Image (cartoon, grey):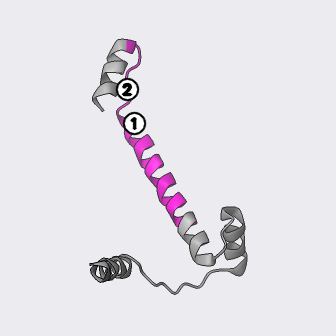
Amino acid sequence: MVLTYLTNTMQYHISYRMKVTAILADELVHNVKAYTRSATVTEAITIALKDWVDIYNIKEINKQIKQNPIDIKNIQNTRNINRTI
């Protein structure tokens, strides 16, 4: 039973990871590693990419809100909208 669990765990990691070769400026990698306070370059780049995706998603949500803003003149209506989300 334990052997099956370990095999599945190993398959999961192999299936969802990607090895990438990229040419990046040393200063950029050094700054990302310093700002993320990461021990490894892989960890630093992973954190930076996740943060970038999060910021991108926030910008997209803000665009949607700008196109269809919620009217907060009626506070009860706003509360009802928030409770249904």
* Residue found at x 41% / y 78%: 17
85 left or right, relative to 49: left
Tag shown at residue 35? none
2 left or right, relative to 27: left
x then y, percent, for residue 26:
70, 80
State which quadrant residue 42 falls in: bottom right
Alpha-carbon distance for marks 2 and 1?
7 Å
Q: Amino acid at mark 1?
A: Ile
Q: Can residue 74 be seen? A: no
Give the prevailing secondary structure in the magenta stretch.
helix
The vertical placement of 67 against 34, above or below, is above
* Residue found at x 30% / y 33%: 85
Q: Amino acid at mark 2?
A: Ile
Task: Check if residue 43 falls in the magenta segment.
Answer: no
Q: Secondary structure at mark 1?
A: helix
x then y, percent, for residue 73:
41, 14
Label 2–label 1 contact, CB within 8 A = yes
The vertical placement of 23 against 66, above or below, is below
Q: Quickly name the residue at label 1.
A: 65
* Residue found at x 32% / y 26%: 83
x then y, percent, for residue 15:
33, 79
Magenta region, residue range: 48-75
Q: Quickly name the residue at label 2.
A: 70
x then y, percent, for residue 31:
71, 69
43 left or right, relative to 84: right
Q: Secondary structure at mark 2?
A: loop
The vertical placement of 84 against 79, above or below, is below
The vertical placement of 53 against 83, above or below, is below
